[in-house]
Image (cartoon, rainbow, N blue to C red):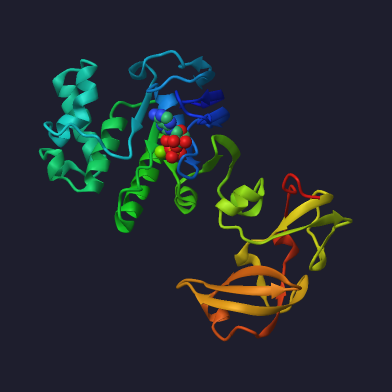
Amino acid sequence: MTRLTLKGLAKRYAGAGQAALHGLDLTVASGSLTALLGPSGSGKTTTMKLIAGLIAPDAGDIRLDDRSIRDLPPERRGVAMVFQNPLLFPHLTVAGNVGFGLRMRGLAPDRIAASVAAMLARVRLSDLADRRPAQLSGGQAQRVALARALVLRPEVLLLDEPLSSLDATLRDEMRGLIRDLQRETGITTLVVTHDQAEAVALADRIALLLDGRLVQHDRPEAFYRRPASEAVARFFGGVNFLPGKARGGRFDCALGALDLAPGLPEGPGLLTIRPEAIRLGPGPNPLPARVQAVTFLGTQTRVDLGVEGFALQALVAPEAGLPLSPGQEVTVSLPPSALWLLPRPEGAA
Ligand code: ADP
Ligand code: MG
């Protein structure tokens, strides 16, 4: 198994005002399934193309364990990439597409046939071995592309938005398949997605890119419990932010002095609490609130609250939200263990 390290990787496209990547440092642990997450235009595909060798960096290095692959041609890097659009050869069968790279390597036909058959069985496409790409559904074509990459036994597998063109059911199936194959093979895998829920469901680790910069690299749950900045918290659905100052285990802000869990930094900061962590009813840090709006969202109910002239948003179980109506006075509580402090945004007093 192989560790992938990006060091100071920078790229500005010719004619572009802004760099697409500003000196990216990222270590993808050997054997991990890491999601490279970020909104459209944040530099995800650029990062993948640099690793695969399809474009060259302006600065920085790309290493597999301790070897630099920065100056190797794509086919000698030990890296396989699957694109969002499967890009299969239309004139070859499914088996022909999967065996293509092995034929390029000059393997004997019987060895190629055996490897291809085994790989097709793994992605559950054995029945479709003789079909042409035009006769496949989007999900099947995506599985052929995955098989074509895996059959080469790459040290690092790169998947660029492999799920975004699939409908919800197929996406679940494909996500499960990627997870299973990754666990079975242990191939260090980097999967691009712009969808935070997808990243959380799929990956052991998430690397979040915003504007061509790595802003947090962590376990999925940390992005909810310990976001590194307001921008990270917002990307993961955070909506409640209160400026103030932490002192002696309490946070002084517009809502009064709130009890904090031990271990948080002292001084000016931005308090945040996940909408799903706010409790309706008495409890720790109780506050009088007025219901502004109640919105049924299916699996959850969103309750917009006014607290001391401040807007807070809570997400509660549907039953908990149903008897509420706008204008009603309620008590909300903010469990200290759910309160997290972020650095104050720049320019704030
Ligand atoms: P993502 O995959 O996260 O959506 P990309 O890596 O494709 O982002 O793009 C990052 C930035 O680089 C964007 O601002 C994009 O417009 C720009 N970009 C991407 N490819 C090119 C290119 N070939 N020429 C000029 N600019 C590009
Ligand atoms: Mg992209």
Which image quarter: residue 307? Answer: bottom right
> Looking at the image, is 198 positioned above or below residue 311?
above
> Looking at the image, is 336 positioned above or below residue 344?
below
Q: Nearer the viewer, residue 73 or 311?
A: 311
Outermost residue toward the right?
Answer: 248
Q: Nearer the viewer, residue 31 or 313?
A: 313
Residue at 33 percent of width and 40 percent of height: 84
| Place of residue 337 in the rendered image (x, y in percent of width and height, measured from the top left) | 72, 60
Residue at 56 percent of width and 51 percent of height: 235
| Place of residue 157 in the rendered image (x, y in percent of width and height, measured from the top left) | 39, 31
Quick check: which quadrant has ligand 2? top left
Which image quarter: residue 118? Answer: top left
| Place of residue 206 in the rendered image (x, y in percent of width and height, measured from the top left) | 53, 42
Asked whether residue 6 appears in the rendered view, the answer is yes
Residue at 36 percent of width and 40 percent of height: 181
Q: Is residue 218 left or right of residue 187?
A: right
Asked whether residue 263 appears in the rendered view, the answer is no
| Place of residue 196 in the rendered image (x, y in percent of width and height, measured from the top left) | 49, 51
